[in-house]
Image (spheres, helix red, strand yellow):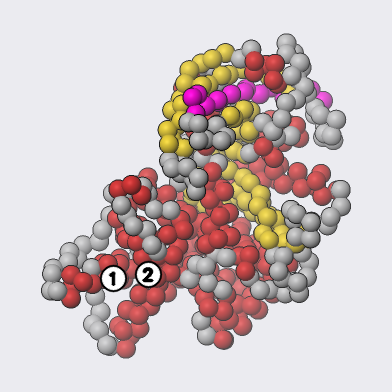
Amino acid sequence: MEQADMLWAAQECGAAEFGDERLTPRLIRVVAALAAHPGESIPVAMGDWHQVKAGYRFLNNPKVTPNAIIAAHAKATAERLKGQNIILVAQDTTGISLNTHEATQGLGPIGPKDSRGLFVHSCLAGRIDGTPLGLVHQKSWARTGTKADDTKESERWIEGMRASKARVARDTRLVMVGDRENDFFGYFAAVAEERVDAIVRAAHDRKLEGEYPSLAKALAAAAAVGTLTVTVSRTPEHPEREATLALYTTSVDLPPTTSYRGPRKDPVTLHVVGAYEVAAPPEVKEPIHWILFTTLPVADVEQAAIVVRWYALRWRIERFHYVLKQGCNVESLQLQTARRLENAIATYSIVAWRILWLTYEARENPDAPCTTVLTDLEWKALLLILNKKKILRGVHVPHNPPSLSTAVIYIARLGGFLARKSDGEPGVKALWRGWRRLEDMVSMLEAAEVSGFVGKG
């Protein structure tokens, strides 16, 4: 797998610019090693002590920055975005808890009292079918603990929107998608200025200009346009289910708020979609109740349904952060400074996207050949390990590469996925566990081929 991972890492990171041409090959080697061992520590992933030291020197080099690392990947993402008529970019912030790292310098408060760590804000671009195509922007920082943090941090949403626009071709429609923290007047003013589309979940009631004095009153008078049935993903508390949503639409004029310090003086006109779950099962404690601001048209049920469906795809950014923290274990990194941690988080982010992309690509293009994402040695190793009992009994096993969806199920089975009819599609957790086992198998085959212990092919 080493050669395949090196090739993939070169495609994602080959455009890195550090002001030192020797650093780009080092980034490629680090990303390839982490991709082959998702969830492992840097020493385990890098292998021998010489490579471990080289990896740590790379993360500590003053010329290496998280912006440069992500920018290289974002250039590769921009290539994948070409040819798409519409691109959705979901942005969100997550806290990286490093509370047990008492010796790490440069951390700041996050969440509960005495909790320390970093914040990471990511912009994940994807197709309208939900397949994530890569990051177009990421920012990490430590809070100072002052009141100025809130005002300063709100700018990350505007910064992410503008960075995303710069990565998307002019003939592609960009739709930014954000949750309730994204709901503030300065962002809507910036969206209007940049002339991009947006969907943002409303965080609270607010004053309006025009016929209705508040958002709540405008929604109370909103027109019912129809219903929409959506699939609600399974959770630890509930299985996957179908939910029927009643859709209401209206348009509102949002005036500048008292906290707004920008140049705009007039209101921003936005459309609103209210999506309310009808007859939710009694065991569901929080039925769907979404109020969505958008620049997209909502004149009928079809247009309103598009807004709701695209907002629902915002879940991908949360899954990305989940893989980054739980799959790549960035909260367990033992590094001495926040700057080294930020470089490591940016590097692991590329790996986390790859795992997430593989999961959803297999769902959207199940019949594609697995050779689009796996090398010959990788898919052959899968067939060997999953058919070893048949092989030992002398039963013939097909030597053709399986489809992408089949290969992903095979990888997930290595990670504990049972693949029963009731289990649905494999999740990212089983996939990253299986990927680690597959790496071990491929490494053994590579070593056997090199040593001549077994023949190639």
Total labels drawn:
2
Residue 259 located left or right of residue 117? right
Indicate left or right for 93 with 241 as reference: right
Magenta stretch contains residue 340: no
The magenta region covers 265-280
Q: Which mark is residue 88?
A: none
Within the magenta stretch, is there residue 270? yes
- Horizontal placement of 378 versus 59: left or right? left
Q: Which residue is mark 2?
A: 438
Measure the C-alpha gap from mark 2 to mark 1.
Answer: 9 Å
Main SS category, magenta section:
strand
| Residue lying at 46% horizontally and 70% vertically, measured from the top left | 36
Whole-percent x and y of residue 6? 46, 71
Which corner quadrant of the image does residue 155 belong to? top right
Element on which disc 2 rests: helix
Res 341 → quadrant: bottom right
CB under 8 Å between discs 2 and 1? yes
Residue 62 at least partly seen:
no
Residue drawn at point x = 50 percent, y = 45 percent? 237
Q: Quadrant of the C terminus?
A: bottom left
Kind of residue at disc 2: Leu
- Give the camera-side residue of 86 and 422: 422
Pinpoint residue 402: horizontal percent, then vertical percent: 26, 58
Nearer the observer, 191 or 220: 220
Decide: few, some or many residues near mark 2? Use Cα within 10 Å; few <14, some 14-19, many ≥20.
many
Residue that label 1 marks: 385
- Circle 1 packing at 10 Å, graded few (<14), some (14-19), many (20+), is some
